């Protein structure tokens, strides 16, 4: 879907167009959304400290949440709607162990027609709700030959392909009260979180995959030539999200842990019938729900205790 670029008056100069609507999500606007949620969770008498963004088919992670309060995205004025199968479109807020978490069952993708800034609005909302850290999950195709369908890959770095070409969430005017104009993406994926997650994997006898993720605009999956190119550039898993959310999270000073569920293998040869499809992605998420719930449940208190 073609999005009409947003037109903003730049004081005294000219009308500028921006690919991202991030600047429209002002503190005032996002605080109104946050206040609606806070009202519905005031009985907890605490603010959530950890946000969890669930990838395609990965919403069952919320089974780890005790005393959940569910709030539909459609009940928050100005908040986008989920349009993709496997993204329920609701917040699930409650406790995992003694940590108050906000889970997002559903994220927003560029291919749904949302601009990249709108895709990252949830990260701003999670920050205003009080989160200091995020777990960002996604379903991804595995390029690394060591990965099997159903494995988890911890993301230790990414290649921001959409951002390379100027389609980044922070393109446009900057409000310094949210974050700085320029900032580093070095160690964007918190090394202490990665270390803790690897320890969890070792204890659970899970393969300890760590790798590089990239997101393409989608919604189509990749050609063999594209996958070969990505593999040659050091990409281990390919998806359609996460990267821009991590950029936004680091801008806001949030700590990030992120992982991919490898839902399919990415074909790098032309032989055989290797058509990836969304149903396969959803099915792998469902089949592995128990592993994800267990992994996230045990990781949450560990990550929450690491403050830098
Ligand atoms: O929201 P995520 O990144 O987990 O979703 C992936 C990428 C596409 O949206 C979808 C393809 O099946 O899964
Ligand atoms: N781009 C992309 N996204 C995915 N999400 C789940 N599997 C895939 C994949 O193979 N490619």
Image: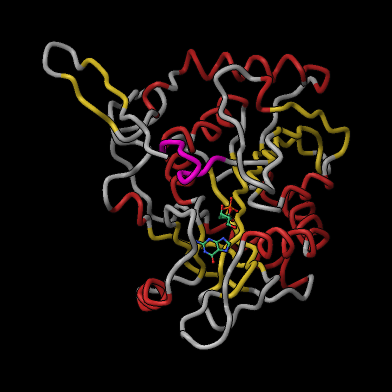
Q: Residue at x 34, y 47 (%)?
A: 184
Q: In the rendered view, does 173 fall on the left or right side of 196?
A: left
Q: Position of residue 301 (x, y in %)?
A: 75, 47
Q: Is residue 242 left or right of residue 251?
A: right
Residue 19 part of the magenta segment: no
Q: Residue at x 68, y 60 (%)?
A: 279
Residue 264's place in the image compared with 176, above or below, is: below
* Left or right: where 293 falls relative to 267: right
Foreground residue among 93 and 112: 112
Q: Quadrant of residue 39?
A: top right
Quarter, ligand 1? bottom right
Q: Is residue 61 left or right of residue 66?
A: left
**First to last magenta residue range:** 108-116
Q: Quadrant of the N terminus?
A: top left
Please tell me which residue lies in front, 94 or 119: 119
The location of residue 125, given as percent across then percent down, is 56, 27
Tell me where residue 231 appears, x and y as whole percent: 41, 76
Q: Position of residue 137 (x, y in %)?
A: 62, 53
Between 45 and 150, the residue placed more toward the observer is 150
- Please give the name of the residue rendered at 78% of the width and 50% of the height, measured from the top-left corner: 60
């Amino acid at each position: 879907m073609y999005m009409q670029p947003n037109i903003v008056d730049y004081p005294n100069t000219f009308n500028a167009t921006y690919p991202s609507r991030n600047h429209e999500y002002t503190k005032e606007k996002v605080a109104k959304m946050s206040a609606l949620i806070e009202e519905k969770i005031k009985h907890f008498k605490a603010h959530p400290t950890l946000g969890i963004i669930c990838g395609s088919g990965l919403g069952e992670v919320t089974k780890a949440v005790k005393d959940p309060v569910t709030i539909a995205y459609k009940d928050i004025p100005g908040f986008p709607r989920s349009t993709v199968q496997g993204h329920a479109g609701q917040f699930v807020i409650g406790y995992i162990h003694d940590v108050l978490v906000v889970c997002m069952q559903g994220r927003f993708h560029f291919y749904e027609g949302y601009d990249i800034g709108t895709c990252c609005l949830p990260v701003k909302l999670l920050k205003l709700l009080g989160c200091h850290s995020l777990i960002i999950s996604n379903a991804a195709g595995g390029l690394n030959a060591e990965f099997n369908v159903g494995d988890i890959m911890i993301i230790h770095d990414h290649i921001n392909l959409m951002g390379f070409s100027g389609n980044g969430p922070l393109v446009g005017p900057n409000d310094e009260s949210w974050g700085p104009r320029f900032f580093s993406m070095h160690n964007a994926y918190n090394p202490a979180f990665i270390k803790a997650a690897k320890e969890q994997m070792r204890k659970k006898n899970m393969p300890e995959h760590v790798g590089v993720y990239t997101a393409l605009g989608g919604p189509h999956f990749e050609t063999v030539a594209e996958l070969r190119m990505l593999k040659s550039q050091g990409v281990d898993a390919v998806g359609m999200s996460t990267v821009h959310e991590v950029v936004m999270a680091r801008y806001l000073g949030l700590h990030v842990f992120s992982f991919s569920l490898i839902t399919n293998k990415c074909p790098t040869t032309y032989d055989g019938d290797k058509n990836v499809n969304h149903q396969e992605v959803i099915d792998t998420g469902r089949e592995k729900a128990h592993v994800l719930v267990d992994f996230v449940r045990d990781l949450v208190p560990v990550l929450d205790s690491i403050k830098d």
